[in-house]
Amino acid sequence: MTLVACSVTVDRPDLVSPAIERAMQAKADGADLVEWRVDLLAMLPDAAGAIARLLRDSPLPTILTVRSEAEGGAFDGSPIEAARVLAEAIAGATPPRFVDVEASLLRDRRASDVVHAALAGVEESQRPSLVTSLHDVGGRPTALWTELERMWSDPACHVAKVAWTARTVRDNLEAFDLLASRQGPTIALCMGEQGVLSRVMGAKFGAFLTFARLDDEEGTAPGQPTVRELVDRYRLKGVTHHTRVYGVVGWPVSHSRGPIVHNAWFGELGLDARYLPLPVGPTWESFKASLAELIDHPMLGLSGASVTLPHKEHLVRFVQERGGALDEASFAIGAANTLIIDPQSRAIRACNTDALAGIESLAEALGRASDDLRGLRVAILGAGGVARALAWACANAGADVVVINRTHARAVELAAAFDGRPGERGPMRVGVGDAASIGCGCFHAFINATSLGMKDGPAPDESPIPDDVALDGVVVMDTVYVPERTPLVQQATSRGARVVTGTGMFVRQAALQCELWTGTRPSMISAQVS
């Protein structure tokens, strides 16, 4: 079973007591070890006493680490200086359970001798295990496999550790390959937002441990989940070799509540499956390359994905190019948000749950049946994948739809794709408006299908509707759900609109996705997206 180590930074002696309290919290949250990161503390003259207290009073087994600036830490001393700090701790009354020593330090003969002499001087039952480590904050180390082979062949190395900053989500796959080829206890993980997959699913490949942070700390490396996220949300200690992988593909995805909702549902359904953030750069080339490698990896077990901005149209193209299938909505709209992968044949298909979830949410607020919006005029703000889904759904139900987008040509393109085509309530009517159209007073509903107002998006403080537009009695629906009270939601609420937040649509479409993947539609009441 992969262990969870909570990293706690201790910079000064006066921070030892608060650090011990934080380690107690980590234990309560489910951590197995605490890593004392003493990079700055190690450079102070009274470091030894403070480190001894950390080791003596720790409520969990310890890893002692002095990380150099060259490898992403804060220690700016020489290898021999770092070695002496570690050696004094090793020789103390309460040695650490593990001591992390950089491979570069061990290549310094004097520093290596100091560390090994200290280890040799400790009774075998109390002797710390040596974690030999390599970190590269710039990207994949050029001699990655060579360095690991050297670590594995060293009798003094108990655990080999490599960590590097992921440049794409595909970097995680090499970390898994390293773990699958391990010749002894190994930690292989990717740092940064694009490396979260390795921090969780390394457990599927037998990682010795993974690192986490406490809820209110930044962590000692970018991309670290919290202890509670690893233990509760991702159920790390229940991950097996057979665990199926799902995720949310988009750019960005840090705002997504998909991991919260889907992992809760998987847990309720008793499924050996996990759902993770899979950030993929905004271009078609990035999407195609990343998704292909994730699907084709022989051991990952990717079984499906939610696909969000800006890749919904890319998903349709990808599935068509690989000979997969599209559902009716995806084919008609030209955009999809759900990828399903057959676990045996690996055949793929794409579906669009945005359309049904969106029309249900809107119709409920309008007091109409979701299949009959005749006589209503709906403004769609935006021209991306979700805008296409909602324009098609509304027009198919008989509404008069007007598409308004900052890039007018994209609005024209979207409208032309649907206007005049057969719909359930007769020929679809989809036209184009401009910014001035928003204030015409002729719409029964506005739908924001842009990323304006989205946390971590390009314009989190903006609303697509000008402040002087009358909204009294109009339905205003936002498809952005993080935060739930977007600038548009606040604006519309204050002006007497009937407001539909993005949460309802999000939970509806997510429940449909879960049903497509598992055959069971979960209870939407159980979904927690806050």
Image: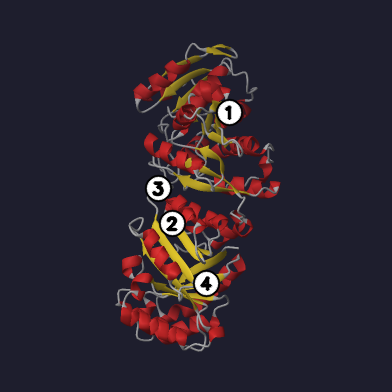
Q: Earlier in the sequence, mark 1 or mark 3?
A: 3
Q: Which residue is mark 1?
A: 362
Q: CA distance from mark 2 to mark 4?
A: 20 Å
Report the mark closest to the observer, 2 or 4.
Answer: 2
Residue 9 picture location, percent across and down: 44, 71
Q: Residue at x 39, y 26 (%)?
A: 405
Q: Earlier in the sequence, mark 3 or mark 2?
A: 3
Report the mark closest to the observer, 1 or 3.
Answer: 3
- Relative placement, left or right, of 297 versus 138 is right
Q: Residue 510 lies in what quarter of the image?
A: top right
Q: Is residue 163 above or below residue 423?
A: below
Q: Residue 368 lies in what quarter of the image?
A: top right
Element carrying mark 4: strand
Residue 388 picture location, percent across and down: 48, 25
**As shown in the figure, which amino acid type bears the numbered disc 4?**
Val
Residue 70 picture location, percent across and down: 31, 67
Q: Is residue 350 above or below residue 378?
A: below
Q: Residue at x 34, y 60 (%)?
A: 143
Residue 405 visible in the picture: yes
Of the pair 449 and 251, the residue shown nearer to us: 251
Q: Which residue is mark 3?
A: 168
Mark 4 touches mark 3? (CB < 8 Å): no
Residue 226 picture location, percent across and down: 52, 60
Q: Quadrant of the N terminus?
A: bottom right
Q: CA distance from mark 4 to mark 3?
A: 29 Å
| Mark 2 closeness class: few <14, some 14–19, many ≥20 residues within 10 Å | many
Mark 4 touches mark 1? (CB < 8 Å): no
